Amino acid sequence: MGKIIFYEDRNFQGRSYECTSDCADLYSHFSRCNSIQVESGYWMVYERPNFMGYQYFLPRGEYPNYQGWMGFNDCVRSCRMIPQHQGSHRIRIYEHSDFGGQMMELTDDCPSVYDRFHYNDIHSCNVLDGYWLFYEHPNYRGRQYLLRPGEYRRYSDWGAITPRIGSIKRIIYSN
């Protein structure tokens, strides 16, 4: 089970809210979020309610200000716990919507989609095993997108505004 604590002020000060499961709307618990403690588990926090807007991956640790999780502002409106996955990771990426065009299958991290596949516009994907992160830029930088097991027929299904993906990483729990 995971546990995350949100604080209204920097350095874990001010009003706080503790969460142990997914929450689609955090606004009733706090109006701003300037620091976070992840006591256990891995989490995605979202800028908007219903798991929308900018996404931020937070492993266990302390984040004394929103710049610590690469946030653009103090707005956190929803969160999702990422379950621990045992076993292999497998994802199929496609160059066109609805699983069209060239398909590539990944079972490991990819620091540069372009270097590996000679394209970096991913329009659809199918997550067969495990949980994955898409990053906007190579070397795991830029906007982040959580991909859970299932089908994503177009890039907007994982919350992106463009199909450009620079790198892909498996979410693997470490002890």
Image: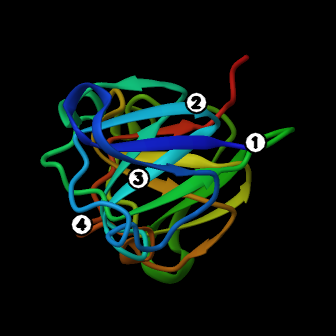
Quadrant location of the N terminus in the rendered image: top right
Quick one: which residue is furthest to the right in this view? Answer: 87
Please tell me which residue is depicted at 17% across the width and 49% down the height of the picture: 74
Q: Earlier in the sequence, mark 1 or mark 2?
A: 2
Location of mark 1 (residue): 84
Q: Residue 71 location in percent, x, y?
A: 21, 42
The Cα–Cα distance between marks 4 and 2, rounded to whole angstroms, is 33 Å
- Can you tell which of label 1 and label 3 is closer to the viewer? 3
Disc 1 crowd rating (10 Å Cα; few below 14, some 14-19, many 20+) is some
Please tell me which residue is depicted at 41% across the width and 73% down the height of the picture: 25
- Can you tell which of label 3 and label 4 is closer to the viewer? 3
The Cα–Cα distance between marks 3 and 4, rounded to whole angstroms, is 20 Å
Compared with residue 33, is residue 30 higher up or lower down, i.e. above or below? below
Quadrant location of the C terminus in the rendered image: top right
The Cα–Cα distance between marks 1 and 2, rounded to whole angstroms, is 15 Å
Left or right: residue 151 compared with residue 49: right
The Cα–Cα distance between marks 4 and 1, rounded to whole angstroms, is 29 Å
- Disc 1 element: loop
Please tell me which residue is depicted at 52% across the width and 42% down the height of the picture: 4
Residue 162: numbered disc: 4
Quick one: which residue is furthest to the left in this view? Answer: 73
Left or right: residue 172 compared with residue 137: right
Compared with residue 23, is residue 37 higher up or lower down, i.e. above or below? above
Q: Dividing the picture into quarters, in which one does residue 149 lie?
A: bottom right
- Disc 3 element: strand
Location of mark 3 (residue): 45
Q: Earlier in the sequence, mark 2 or mark 3?
A: 2
Residue 39: numbered disc: 2
- Can you tell which of label 4 and label 2 is closer to the viewer? 2
Residue 137 seen in the figure: no
